[in-house]
Image: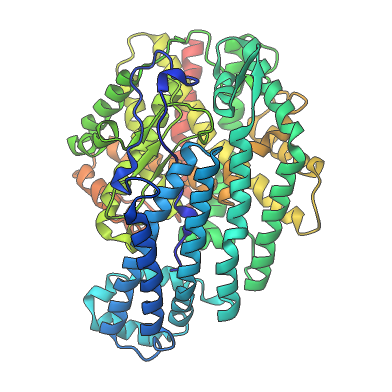
Amino acid sequence: MTHPLSAHLGPAPVQDAAASQGGRDLGDLPEWDLSDLYAAPDAPEVARDLDWLDDACARFADAYEGKLAEIDAAGLRQAVLDYEEIDLKAGRVMSYAGLRYYQQTTDAERAKFLSDCQDRITGATAKLVFFSLEINRIPDDRMEAHFAADAELARYKPVFDRLRAMRPYQLSDELEKYLHDDSVVGASAWNKLFDETMAGLEFEIDGEVLGIEATLNLLTDPERSKREAAARELAATFQGNIKLFARIHNTLTKMGEIQDRWRKMPTPQTGRHLSNQVEPEVVEALRNAVVAAYPRLSHRYYELKRKWLGLDTLEVWDRNAPLPMDDPRLIGWDEARATVTDAYAGFDPRMAELAEPFFTDGWTDAAVKPGKAPGAFAHPTVADAHPYVMLNYLGKPRDVMTLAHELGHGVHQRLAAGQGELLSSTPLTLAETASVFGEMLTFRKLLAGAETDAQRKVLLAGKVEDMINTVVRQIAFYDFECKLHDARRDGELTPDDINALWMSVQGESLGPAFTFMEGYETFWAYIPHFVHSPFYVYAYAFGDGLVNALYAVYEEGDAGFQDKYFEMLKAGGSKHHKELLAPFGLDASDPAFWDKGLSMISGFIDELEAMEDA
């Protein structure tokens, strides 16, 4: 129950979108208003809350340290409520500092403010480390008696269950306190080095200097020469920084190995599985089902794409190329908003209502700007505030799907907030449910509106590519990480060693339609998940497979599906995936469950092949 400081990410203040890369002709792109958290970094409320945290943590330690073994149920309930109040305040400060930072990671003042807040909160909350350690020493029968005696305390049982799952891997009190203090100069410092380096990279294409987001976007350009130029410039720049990226990965992987060894965790993945509340055999079943499906999914689809593009082989810069019959027009922000909102409302008006403030109230930052973190995310902040969505919107069809995805997260986070700070957080495996479902709703609406076979083909192909990127690519990423962590146990890895591990999964996952340019072996360097959240990536495949199965139930006309769906999202982290899926007649521990999800992807490819033969 120690506060996950690293989970409180975030981006920053607003520049003129029209003047930024990718901001032209897309309409009035929204920017964050972070004043719902704090008015400014020097606002008196920031100092007030940091002072309050110092005092509250000290009071908490005075009240409860060394006393939890004998405390009664009412006393333990009060301790949990006090802890939750501290968690809420620390989360608000770190959310604000993080969001400002990610909006402009190259700004030294923002980086300093984030680091100072992190140092201050880590110092204050060091006094709380005893709590989880003492809780884990309470016998099971005594904990069960506490839950039986106090219904309000029993509501927090899932929090205690997650905490006590770590009991076999708990270190001494002194070591746990050391690791807590060390965190600000440990993994989080390497994370910031990666973020600042990546945000500061410059790529020159046709005489124009671009950031990484705009350069990656060129990999979807209709002109093959532009895609190739972008891919080669990415490779050259990554190669120029490869020693630094290898150092970051070597260090973080070794740090993980050391902690795992001290904690006696059986595998490098164990910690992630525990935090995801998912059994290792379920993840293994997912991984094996996807790898076995490579030939009928990615291999088959990319062979189709190779024919459509009229090429002997595909290169890496063709993977996300638009189809020849695709309409290359840019999609303005207002159209993107209408598309996603209508799709959400078509499922249930409540979905569109929950999404509306992200467009109107400064809850979304959409424009590409110098120094802004690449990619997209939805950050829940804290239960008594609201989520914020970050995008790098460039007007491509995939950007519309990203909007649908992140708004799904936002809706989920708003609904789960009712559980309170400690129970609202959803494990990663379930955190992708609403986001992928939101994408599916948007896709199905667009597909229903297709007026020609060509439009339908483009939409189907785009969805298949997105699903392959979400399922096949992420499981290949997971295999790469597993190999990386295993190899690091035998010693330092050179950049060439890491390159070879990366390439060992690429051909297998993408298939024989591809050849790989020289330099592609360095593309592991820019994937942030490997740095920020080791083994996170399988959660995407888990979420996609889960949603495909869930959507099949919806299409079958399951009575009361919408209400059951909203109840699932409202549950946040208060229930296990088995309990959440039971009302829909689904069970993720059944190996056939994953085949059901994968069959939706292969069914779309069947339809594309049938269109070829027609």
Q: Position of residue 206 (x, y in %)?
A: 65, 11
- In this picture, is 499 found above or below 138? above
Q: Is residue 83 visible?
A: yes
Is 345 situated left or right of 463 in this image?
A: left
| Residue at x 47%, y 56% (from the top left corner) | 117
Spot the residue most to the bottom. 70
Q: Can residue 483 be seen in this view?
A: no
Q: Which quadrant would residue 304 be assigned to in this image?
A: top right
| Residue at x 46%, y 37% (from the top left corner) | 103
Q: Which quadrant would residue 379 be assigned to in this image?
A: top left
**Quadrant assignment for the N terminus:** bottom left
- State the residue in front, 390 or 304: 390
- State the residue in front, 271 or 133: 133
Q: Position of residue 500 (x, y in %)?
A: 78, 40
- In this picture, is 115 found above or below 313? below
Is 597 situated left or right of 76 in this image?
A: right
- In this picture, is 309 found above or below 13? above
